[in-house]
Image (cartoon, rainbow, N blue to C red):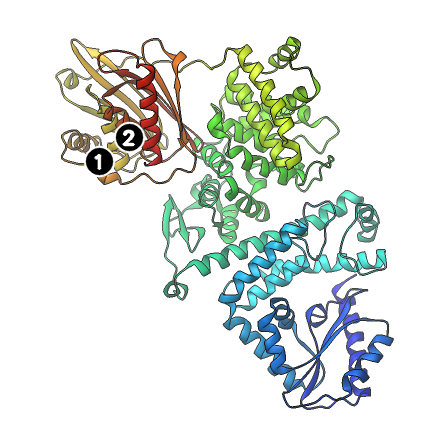
Amino acid sequence: MTASERAGRAAAADRLCQSAYAGGAGPDVGVALVAVGGYGRGELAPHSDLDVVLVHDEGVDPGELAQQLWYPLWDSGWRLDHSVRSLPEMVSAAEDDLKVALGLLDIRHLAGDPNLTLRLRATMLAGWRRQARRRLPELRELVDRRHAVLGELAHVSVPDIKESEGGLRDATVLKALGATWLVDVSSGELEGSRQALLDFRDLLHDETRRPTDRVAPELWQPMAVALGLPDAEAAQRHVREVGRRISHLSRLTWRRVDALLARPESVKGARRPALEPVADGIALSRGEVVLDARARPDLDPTMLLRAAAEAAERDVVLAPATAARLVRECPPLPTPWPERARDALVRLLASGPGLLPVWETLEETGALSGFLPEWERIRMLPHASPIHRFTVDRHVVETCIEAAALIRAVARPDVLLVAALLHDIGKGGRIEHSLAGEPIARAIATRMGFDAVAVDLVAGLVRHHLLLSETATSRDLDDPATVQGLLTKVPDVDALELLLALTEADCRAASPKAWSAWRAGLVTAMATRARAALGGHSAPAALPDELALPDQVVAGGTWVGVEPQGSGARVTVVAPDRVGLLADVAATLAMQRVQVRAARAWSQDAGDVPFGVSVWEVAEPDLDPRVLRERLSAISEGRIDAASRLGRPVPAKLEPVVAVRAEASASATVLEVRMDDRLGVVHLVCTALAGLDLSVRSAHVSTLGPQAVDVFYVQETHAGRLSDERASAAAHAVRSALRGS
C-alpha cells in the first residue's frame, strides 16, 4: 500500500460524492459539499469512513438535497459520517468542540460552491490561529488523557496505531500545532513517519477485513509477511520505531508550546531570544539548551554529553538541531573517557524524569551510537516477560530514572547509575542476559574510564542484578545457607547496598506489580540479614597524611597555594586552626563560584601551634591564590559577611540525609552528609557546626555524580567525642542548614 493508492481511493470517493451532488441537483452557489478529517486529507484506508459536511450560507436552504445526496453514498457501500450545517453553525461548533475544530482544519472541497469552501477554510484557520493560546492548554489535556488510557505505541502489548501515543492521532495534532504558527514542527520527519503508519494501517485493514486500528499479538506475523519483513519481531520494531519517533516529536513540540505559553506577552514577540550561559559553550534559550556563539564543539569531545546533562538536569529540551550539530562536529571520545565526560554521563543518568526526553533526542539524532554503540543490541527489543510494560531499551531508561531517586542510599551513586544503564545490555542473544551482559558492561565501564574497583562493581551488579529478588522469593530466609550463598557473590556492605538499590529500581521500572509490598518486604529482609552478616557498615574513610607546612605558616600566617591539574586545580589552604576556619575557606571558594569535586581537611601541629590544613580539588584551573587569600582574610576578619553574599540556599533537589556514624571513630563523632551536589554545601555544614562551637578535626568531601558525600570528624573544642545529645543537635543543625530553614 502506498500514498498513491490512498489518493486513488480518495479520488474514487470524490467522484462518487460529486456524482451524488449533481444527481441531487445541488446548486453551484451558496451550498458546498466538503470533506473533513482523514477524508479531507485524502487518506482513506480500505475500510475508512467518508466524513462529509453539506455546508450552506446563512439564509440558504439546501432543501431536499441532503436526503438525495446521502442515499447514493449509503448504497455505494461506504461507511458515512455526515452532517448539514450553515457556515455560522460550523464556526459555532468549532468553538464549542475542540475535536470538531481539529477536524475542520482539513477541509477539502468536493462539490458545489468553491468560494464557500474557501471562505469556510479561511475562517476555520483564522479562528484556530486567533484562539490558539487559549485552546492549546485544553488540547494538551485532551492529548494527555488519551495517552494515559491507551499508552505508547512503542511499548504497549496491543497498540492502537491511531489513538496510542505516537500514533496517527498525535501526528494530526502536530499538524494542528504547526498550523497555529506559534511553534515549528519538523514537517519532513513527521510526514515520513505518518506515511509509514498510514501504509501499515492499509495493510492491517486488508488483513483483518475491517476498520481496526489495534494490532493484536497474533497479527504481527501476517503483518510481517505483508511488509516483506523476516518475522513478527521485525514488524514490531518497524511500527514501534515509527511510533517512538512521532512520540518524540510530540513531546518536543509540546515542551515548546509550554515554554511559549509560560513567557510574558512582551517576551513572546521578541525576535532575538536571549542566551543564558549555563556551562562552558552551552546556553539556555527559550527553554532549550543550545550552543553559545563561542562554542567550539570541534575541540571538545565532551560537549555533547555536557549539553545533554544540562538539559536533563533542568528538565528542558536539548534542541535537536544542537544535538545533531554536536554529533557532526564533536570529535570521538578518547579511550578511556576524560573525567569530564564520565561526570557528565552520570549527571545525565541522575537527572530523574528529565532524562527520558533528552535520551530520546540523543537516540533520534544518532548520538548514542557515538558514545554507546552497544545500545543497538537492545534498541526497540521487546521483552519476553509479560510483567514488563516497556521494550528493553525504554525499561533501561526507566530503571535509571528510578535509580536516580535512590542514590543517597549508596556509597557509589555513579556506579549505581551506570549499572542501571547496563543491567540488561546482554539481552537479545541466546545466552542468559545477566551472564552475557557482565563482560559487555565491564568493557563499557573500562572504556568510560572508571577505576578497577568501580569496573568490578559495575560488572558484578550486572551479573547479579536478579540475585536478591530471586533469592528472596525462592529460598528460606531463615536458613543460614541462604545468606551464605548470597555473600559468596556480594563482597561487602557497599556492594550489597548497590545491589539492593538496583533491584528496587529494576523492579519499579518493570511494572507496579514487580515491586509489590510482598516482594519489597522479602528483598529488604534478605538484605538486612546479609548486612548483619557483613558487619553492618562499611569502613570509615582513612585520615589524611600530614602536610609539610610552608615557613610563613609556621610563623603564624595564612598560606594559599593553587596547583593546576588537568581541567581543574588543587587548592591548598593552611592557617592557624580555630572553630569556623573550614567554613570560611568553603565560603571563600563558594563566593568565587568554584565547583568543588573533592576535599580533605585536618588539623596538625607545628610546635605548640595547631594549624588547619585543607586541600580542595576544584573544577576551575585559573585561580589566583592572592585573590583567594585576600578573600579568606576579609571573611575571617568580618570585613565580608559571607552568609549575606551567598544568599539563602537554593532548594535541594534531593532531601539531605545527615547520619551519625557512632562506630566510625573512637576519638571523634562522625557525621555523614549526603545531598545533591551544589555550590556552598561544605560552607553550610561547617557554619552550622561552628555555630554550636564544634570543631571539625578532619573532613572528607567527594562528589559522586550528582551527589555530594561528605564525612566530617567532629569534636568538642576541648573534649573529644560528642555526647549523644550533642551529636543529635549537630545532625539537626546541619540538616536544617542544608534545607535552608
Q: Are marks 2 and 1 in contact (CB under 8 Å)?
A: yes
Q: Residues within 10 Å of mark 1 (few under 14, many from 20)?
A: many
The kind of secondary structure element at disc 1 is helix
Q: Position of residue 215 (x, y in %)?
A: 77, 51
The kind of secondary structure element at disc 2 is helix
| For residue 613, above or below residue 277 | above
Disc 2 or 1, which lies upstream in sequence? 1
Say whether residue 81 is left or right of residue 329.
Answer: right
- Which mark identifies residue 642? 1
Q: Which residue is the site of mark 2?
A: 683
Q: Residue at x 73, y 75 (%)?
A: 52
Residue 544 in sight from this viewpoint: no
Say whether residue 522 is left or right of residue 225.
Answer: left
- How many marks on residues? 2
Amino acid on which the number 2 mark rests in the picture: His
Q: Position of residue 253 (x, y in %)?
A: 54, 57
Q: Quadrant of the N terminus?
A: bottom right
Q: Position of residue 279 (x, y in %)?
A: 38, 43
Residue placed most toward the observer, 533 or 294: 533
Say whether residue 120 is left or right of residue 129.
Answer: right
Q: Position of residue 289 (x, y in %)?
A: 44, 50
